[in-house]
Image (cartoon, coloured by chain):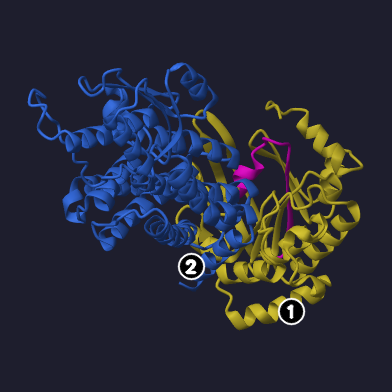
Chain colours: A blue, B yellow
Amino acid sequence: MDVFAAFVRKEFLHIFRDKRTMLILLVMPVVMIVIFGFALSNEINNINLAVVSSQRNETVRQLVERFDANHYFTIVGEYATAEPVEHLLRAGKADMAIVFGTDFDRQPSVQLIVDASNPNIASNEVFYTSSVIRKAMAETRPATQEEAVVTTHLRMLYNPQMRSSYNFVPGIMGLIFILISALMTSISIVREKEQGTMEVLLASPVRPIYIILSKMVPYLVISCFNLLTILLLAYLLLDVPVTGGIAGLCILSLVYIILSLALGLFISTVVNTQAVAMLGSVMTLMLPVMLLSGMIFPIESMPKVLQYISDVIPAKWYIMAARKMMIEGQTLAQVYVEASILTGMTVVLMALSLKNFKNRLG
Amino acid sequence: MDSVIKVEELTKRFGNFTAVDHISFSVQRGEIFGFLGANGAGKTTAMRMLCGLSRPTSGRGMVAGYDIETQYEDIKNNIGYMSQRFSLYEDLKVWENIRLFGGIYGVDEKEIKHRTDELLAELHFEKERNAYVKSLPLGWKQKLAFSVAIFHRPSIVFLDEPTGGVDPATRRQFWEMIYAAAEQGITIFVTTHYMDEAEYCNRVSIMVDGRIDALDTPRRLKSEFGATTMDEVFRALARHAGRKE
């Protein structure tokens, strides 16, 4: 056991003395949370609105006032014709133009012209603006329009403001743990192979399992630290609720972290140089996690083939479960399907990589 | 005479390729045994089998009194190993490396402290105790690596091309350390590329195509081949090699 403690200490020293590693381990998660949480969002922050109305009557005026009072909108100008609006949209000074019909009182219709260069944001903006108009019209002209056939009332559950950070945080967690646990573990094992120290260790009486476990312990500890940092940041900075119970989420994350460690070990048994380990990890882990796990693109809208592929990506199950727990408020018991898939994957990967590691010695 | 290494008909095959082909030899206690051969002749494979890093396909071998087939864990406790590539941790300090490897071989804490002081004094490394290994010149690193390899007083130490890339003056000092270790009764099993180093060995074996083609003292080998240097002996044997480097 003394030897094991000495090895764990040595691994921590390797990490603490390498500035680049430290940077990746401690700064990257924070940066990613900030970037994804704030910058990379589909949510509506401020819509620069241009108003076009050929005639100003009471209803139009009230509606415009309403937009003016809403802090999601900034009115950049009011015009009699739509001509200058195109210029404004092109210059990026306006995000949307609202064109009122000529006879708005009798025939209330508006046209929304939107800068759809980012389609996700544009559709969110249209969605939100329409709801504001609908609400205003319902209030000012109560029950006069009997012929309005069906009125749809929308209630956005779990994420009423449609905040994208709710969606991103679980995704980032899925990505960060894979990166830290799998990538860094595989690189640190392969580095010893490359430098020749692994051979010296294998020629020594130290048990190979100690070498492997001692590689995993520091990254496990650091991942847990990162888990806490991310949850704190998400909770305090991005107001992501963790409604499904923090303990359950931590257990789920722990399983996923161990899975990532096993993945890292597996990679290290098949490659021999750090460069290949790095490339392999990025190609086989990072890209699929970003593209196929549902972190950014919804899995439901992928072609069937990609959906099947996404089934073998551990991050998909973790992100799915984490979303349910953080946003929908489900408990660990309710996400048992995802949790058991993750556990199963962990066991298989661990067994496979330990077997592989042993074979390498023979 | 008691032999610490005794190998009979040792063979290692990788698929169709026979890397080590029925070699037999023995090494006496305290002997400096040179293990020579061109690249690809099979010396590293043979050495890995002796160290318990690789299982033989057939044949028998005893190292430090233990069977290489079944008791390789015991062998590992009784040997030191210095690999071809520099094998200490560059980002650990000198004393941390010594302590780590001392601990791996089960030397107790107090003894590690005592021997560390002794070792650093012998190498005149007292000032470098807290230096990172990566800051040392290559020759110093190799000397340190050798000292670490024999730190736990093994009965045999395996050195795989220990002086590669080291300047002649340091090589000389390195061999003085090897002699000092041999005098303490540590058997030295060394592979090398340098034929002048072969002359320092008590006995030398030369591997060609997985077989040992010659094994004797440098002096007798030279007279047998009518050569004045080991280099000529080596060339005479290597000429018949079928394997390309």
- A208 w.r.t. B94: above or below: above
Q: Residue furthest left?
A: A146
Residue B33 lies in the magenta stretch: yes
For badge 2, the amino acid type reads: Phe
Cα separation between marks 1 and 2:
24 Å
* Quadrant the N terminus of chain B occupies: bottom right
Towards the viewer: A96 or A330: A96
Give the magenta-colored segment's residue range. B29-47
Position of residue A312 measured from the top left corner of the image (x, y, whole percent): 31, 35
- Residue that appears at 39% across and 53% down: A238
B194 left or right of A108 in image: right
Instruction: Name the residue tied to disc 2.
Output: A4
Instruction: Have a look at marks 1 and 2 and say if they share a chain.
Output: no
Tell me which chain the residue with mark 2 is part of.
A
* Quadrant the C terminus of chain B occupies: top right
Q: Quadrant of residue B238?
A: top right
Tell me which chain the residue with mark 1 is part of.
B
Position of residue A103 measured from the top left corner of the image (x, y, whole percent): 26, 18
Secondary structure type for disc 1? helix
Position of residue A94 measured from the top left corner of the image (x, y, whole percent): 47, 29
